[in-house]
Amino acid sequence: MSDTTIVSQVFLFALLLFFCAVHGQVSYSIPEEMSKGSLVGNIAQDLGLDLKRLKSGKARIYTEDKTEYIELNKDRGVLLIKERIDREMLCGQRTPCALHFQIILENPMELYSINVEITDINDNPPSFKKNEIKFKISESAVTGSKFVLDKALDLDIGTNGLQSYTLKPTDNFVLKLHSQADGSKKVEMVLQKQLDREKEENMSLLLTAIDGGEPLMSGTVQIYITVLDINDNAPVFTKAVYKSVIPENSQKGTLVTSVSASDADKGSNGEVSYFISNSHDGVSELFHIEENGDIILVGELDYETAKYYQIDIEAVDKGGLSDSSKIIVDVTDVNDNSPVITIMSQSTSVNEDSPPATVIAMISVNDPDSDTNGEVHCDMNGNIPFAIKSTSNGFYSIVTDSALDRETDSEYNITVSCSDEGVPSLSSSLTLTLQITDVNDNAPLFEKSSYEASVAENNSPGVSIFAVRAVDADWRQNARVSYVLDEGMINGVAISSYVSVNAESGVIHAVRSFDYEQIKDFQFRVKAQDGGSPPLTSNVSVKIVLQDQNDNAPQVLYPVQTSGSLVAEIVPRSADVGYLVTKVVAVDVDSGQNAWLSYRLVKVTDRALFEVGAQNGEVRTIRQVTDKDAVKQKLTVIVEDNGQPSRSATVNVNVAVADSFPEMLSEFTDFTHDKEYNDTLTFYLVLALAVVSFLLIVSLIAILSVKCYRWKRDRMFYKSNGHLPVIPYYPPHYADVGGTGTLQHVYNYEVCRTTDSRKSDLKYSRPSSQSIISLDTNGTLSLRNAHREKLVMEDPDDQNCKRTDSYSPSFYRLSI
C-alpha cells in the first residue's frame, strides 16, 4: 500500500472520528487480516468516557450475530482485534464492508453505536473455475467469429479486484472484453485469421487474468482448440438479454424462463446445445437449462442472500460454433422471516421507588425482509407500569411508565411482541421477568384501631394479659415489626411499672399485681416499629379494665362495736309487730355482686321475737312483746356479700326490752357489776397465790384510788357540758329506706341516782323514737340528746333528787 493511500485513509479516519464523536457514535476503518491484539482505536477517548465509568458500568460489546471480531479492553479503554477478519468471507463482493456493534454501559444504561469499516487488501489472486477450456472450431469459421471464455473470479474488490485479461499467442485469435451491468466483463475470443486445419489442427492458448493490486496477482487457464472441418453458420440467440422475475422460496422445478437460439446450417451442424457458462459463482447450483432452452429452478432462492442473478448461457452447434446471451433473474421478497428479538441488556430487579423512565432492558429487533415485510413495530402486554420506546433504528428500551408498588405486584412478566407489516404479518415475542425490590414505604398497621382487655385484680406479676398485633406490607427486614410501650404516666406513676410488652410477639404482661379498689382501668399506647431504615412506626391505644374479685369482707358501720362500753337498743314492751329495733349498716368496698350484701341472724336470745331484713339489715319485731320476754336480748347478725367465695362480717346487737329506765338499768348494771366483780376476784386470787402480803397492800391502794377517781370524775361531769357521741357516717349508697335516718324514733330519759337505789328515779317519755343506752363498765351512762343541766335539776319538787350531805349522787351518761 502506497504512502499516498495511507495518508488518505488516516485523513478519512480522522474526519470520521470527529463527526461520530459529535453525534455520540464512533466509526473506524481498518484493513482486513490484521493480527490478533492489534489496536483498532481508543474508544474511551473518542466517546469522552472515563476509564472508571467503563469499569463501573460493566461496559461490554453487543453484536446481533454473537460473533466478536473485536474486543474491548476496559483497563486501557481501547478496541483490539480479537479474531482474524477476512473481508471476503465477511462481506463477499458487497461494499462497503463494515462491522456494526454496540457498546453497552449499565447503571445507568447507555448505548453507543460503533462502525468499523473493513478495507480490502490484495490477498486473493484471480482464479478460473476450470484449469482448461476446449473448443472445436471449423476451419471454415469466418473472421470475427466469437467464442465466449469463462470469466475469472477475484474475491478482492476495487483496484485489488480483477482488472484485465491477456491471451497468448495472438496469431489467430484476439481477446475482446465487454463491460456488464453488474460491473463485470464479458470475455470473448475473436477469430482474426482464418484457420487451416491442414496446417495446424490443434492449438494451445493461455488466458491470463490480472488484478490491480500491489504487487499484481494473476490466474491462468489453458485453452485447447481443435480445428474441424467446415461449419460456416453459428447459432444466434433470439435475444441478447432475457429477463425473469421469480419470488423467493419458489419450489424446485419452477420454470424461470426459456431461451432459444437458431442455426442456419443443416444437419448436425444446425443442432444447437445450451450450456450455462458462469458456473463458478454458484448459478449452476440454482438453475439448470434443459435441451429445449427452459431454465429450471433446482435450488432454493433467498431474497435476503441475493436479490438478483445473472445467468450466462451459450448455444453451441455440432460444428463448434456458438453464441452467448444472458438471463437477468430478479428475486422478489416474500415475508418469510419473523422479527428477531435479541436482549442486549437486562436488569433482573428494580426498586419500587424508581422514578418513571428508568431503563430496565434494552433489546434489538431485526427483520431481514425488505420494504413493508421488514418494517417492525413492537408493543407490550397491557396493564403493566412499563413502556417500550424506540431509541434508534432497530433498538428499543423498556422503561418504567408509572410508579411501582411491590406490595401490589412483587414480580412482573413483561412480554414484548414485535410484528412486521407483511401479509400475512409475522411476529415474535419475548418475555422478561422483573423482580420489584422492596423499599420501606409502609408503616406497621395494627389489626384494630384500639384494643380493650380485662384482667382480674390480685393477678400474679408477669401474667400475660393479651397481645397486640401489627402487620407490615413490606418485605423481609422492612416488614419485621417490634413493639414498645409509648411512655406515659398513670396517677403519677410510669406506665412501664404497670405493664410491659414483648418486643417480638406483642404480648402485654402485667408488671405488678392490680387492686381494683385503687384503680378501675387505665389506658396506654403501644408503638409498632418496623426494621427499615429509617424505621416507620404507628401507635394504638390499649385500655385495660380490671375485674373485681371478692377480696374485701363487709365492714359494719352501725352499730359501732366498742370494747369499753355496752350499747343497747331499747324496745318498749308495748311495741307492735314490725317495730324497728335498729338497723345494721354495712358496706363492701368491692363492686358488682361482690358488694351485694345480705343480712341474717345467726344467734339470738329469742328467735321468735326478732328478725333481720335480708336486704336492708333492719331488725324488727315479728310478734307482740310480752311481759314474759327477758329484758336483756342479744342478737348476732352476720353480713355476707354475694362474691364467690362469699365473705362476711358479724355484729352483736344488744336489745333492752323495758318500759322504764330503772328496769332496764338494773338488768344491765348487774350485768356490768357481775362482770367487773368476777374480773376483780380473778385478779385478786391470782395475786393472792403470788404474795398474800402484797395483795393486802395493793387492795387498799386500789380501793382508795378507785374512790378518789370516782369522786373526781363525778365532779368533772357535773361541771362540764360534755360532748355527744358522733353519729355514724353512712355513705350515700346506703341511705335508709322508708325513713329520714337509720333510727326512726328518739327517746328522752331523765335520770337521777343516789347511793341509795331506793331514792333513784327515771322519767321516761316516748315521742315516737327509740333510745340507745351506752353503759360503760365502770357504771357510767351517757345521754345523747338530753341536756345534762336538766338531768341534774329538772324537778325541784322531787325529794329523791335533792342533794344532801347524807348521800352523794352519781350521774350516768345516756346515749340517745
Image (tube, grey):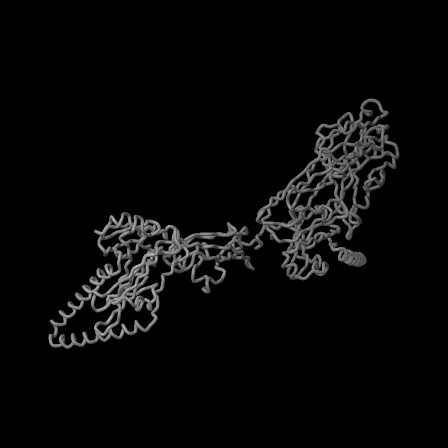
On the image, the x and y values in percent for residue 165 come to 81, 44
- Residue at position x 26%, y 58% in the image: 660
Q: Tell me, yes or no, if residue 585 can be seen here.
A: no
Q: Residue at x 64, y 50 (%)?
A: 403
| Residue 420 x/y as whole percent | 71, 38
Image side of residue 166 versus residue 576, left or right: right
Image quarter of the C terminus: bottom left
Q: Nearer the viewer, residue 609 or 44?
A: 609
**Who is closer to the viewer here, 629 or 137?**
629
Which sits in the foreground, 212 or 514?
A: 514
Residue at x 36% of width, y 64% of height? 726
Q: Kindly tell me whether residue 103 is visible in this rendering.
A: yes
Q: Is residue 388 above or below residue 276?
A: below
> Considering depth in this image, is 348 or 674 the residue closer to the camera?
674
If the image is split into quadrants, where does the N terminus sit?
bottom right
Taking the image as shown, residue 678 lies to the left or right of residue 365, namely: left
**Residue 78 percent coordinates (x, y):** 68, 59
Residue that protrudes farthest toward the top in the picture: 267
Say whether residue 445 is left or right of residue 172.
left
Residue 479 appears left or right of 288: left
